[in-house]
Amino acid sequence: MGEQTGHTDELRQRVERHIEAIGEFTSTPGQGTTRLTYSEQDLQARQYIKRTMTEYGLQVREDGFGNIFGRLEGTIEGAPGVLIGSHFDSVPNGGSYDGPAGVVAGLEVARLFRENGLTPKYPLEAVAMTEEEGGRFIGGLLGSRAMLGVISREEFAQTTDKDGITTVEAMRAIGLDPSLPGKREKESIKAFLELHIEQGPILEEEGIPIGIVQAIVGLTQIQVTVRGSAGHAGTTPMERRADALVAASKIVAQLPELAKEQGNGTVATVGRLNVLPNGANVIPDRVVFTADLRAGREEDVLGILDKAETLARSAAGEGIEVEIERQLYIKPKRMSGHVRELLEKSSGALGIEYRPLNSGAGHDAMIFSDFTEVGMLFIPSRGGLSHCPEEWSDPADIARAVDIFYEAAKKLTEAE
Ligand code: HGY
Ligand code: MN
Ligand code: MN
């Protein structure tokens, strides 16, 4: 049989099987995908991914952070690799495509290399990264930031979840070895390709199967702790209260206005908020919440950050104290022009319609873009929905992206 170009139905069926299989590894069956990092569900997904990599004839390796690599060796000794992949953790009660679509694409491109007897000069590596969402540990993009040395091994090891369990304790609990080699030198990476679901409505509304990402928003996350005084809900007169939740609510309620004021597509979200001591008849004395702030231009990221911090600090006084911790700051990132052109040419050669698109979501590609050439493809999200059980994308679109990455990877790895 001649070289397979242009996805076959078998490829689409394999993609569908992978997504369904990985989607089974959730702690909230029937209520979306919840696969927190270094959980039992993470371990099941990890085993599935490694088994598939082995089946596809790849050399499987896990690093000291839990990232998984499936490598097809190249003929040039010590040459940097072309990595294709994404993350396999999820948000709480999320969907089955955010992350795994990109992991599956990497697996299937590697399989096509093997199926067509291709030998790359530069190694090809399918990669599955850990803790991109920040669903368990603070900040997110932890696997890629640790792999590329954006955070040190010590910072990684000291990161804890909400129960105070550290990353390395959680790794050991599922049999991972945090002492394995960690940081990858940037010289060991030639390029990084990531397929991701759009998580927005544009591709579906325009009926276009592929988006070629031009840029990714800048994002910052701050944690705000508002302190007041606990007290009896019944016997404490209103004028004597320092109610932390009332103070925090005033901050949260004004954030959307600040984002609109900043303009240019700036967004602000409070997705996580804890009230303590959380008793129905107790005046709250502490509220801890995160504010996720994003914009396409760095001046807008800095603008909304400054506005949000000024607002938070203004809530202090009359028994209320406010503490702000900056947890993550990533500038807006542009994708590599060379890789974008390669993806455009590959899509064109396959007769697959595409359009340029910017990303309002953060991705591991943001971290790689400071170290190597990076390209991202998007596929349509049904109803533009993501980070919810309704998230769905068409396996045929994932297969189309595999075809495009296959063409591009042949060039990037100089395979014959
Ligand atoms: O938050 C994000 O944009 C991504 O889903 N981690
Ligand atoms: Mn994602
Ligand atoms: Mn996500």
Image (cartoon, rainbow, N blue to C red):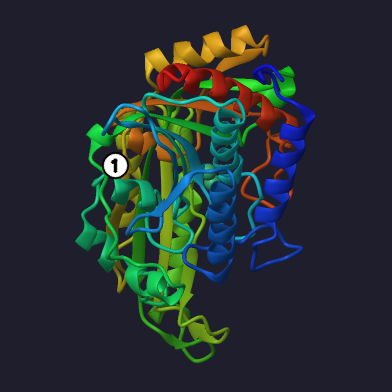
> For mark 1, does the 10 Å Cα neighbourhood hold few (<14), some (14 to 19), or many (20 or more) residues?
few
Task: Estimate the x, y position of residue 63 in percent, counting from the top left.
Answer: 35, 55
Q: Is residue 225 above or below residue 377?
A: below
Say which of 240 and 34 sits in front. Answer: 34
Q: Is residue 342 visible?
A: yes
Q: Is residue 230 left or right of residue 155?
A: right
Q: Is residue 394 visible?
A: no
Q: Residue at x 41, y 27 (%)?
A: 296
Say which of 121 and 364 sits in front. Answer: 121
Label 1 amino acid? Asp
Say which of 151 and 406 sits in front. Answer: 406
At numbered mark 1, what does the secondary structure look like: helix, strand or loop? helix
Q: Residue at x 46, y 73 (%)?
A: 174
Q: Quadrant of the N terminus?
A: top right
Say which quarter of the image contains residue 215: top left
Q: Residue at x 43, y 76 (%)?
A: 173
Q: Is residue 407 above or below residue 376?
A: above
Q: Residue at x 61, y 37 (%)?
A: 199
Task: Estimate the x, y position of residue 224 in percent, counting from the top left.
Answer: 35, 60
Say which of 401 and 32 sits in front. Answer: 401
Q: Is residue 157 left or right of residue 176?
A: left
Task: Estimate the x, y position of residue 85 in percent, counting from the top left.
Answer: 49, 39
Report which residue position mark 1 lands on.
306
Q: Is residue 211 above or below residue 276?
A: above
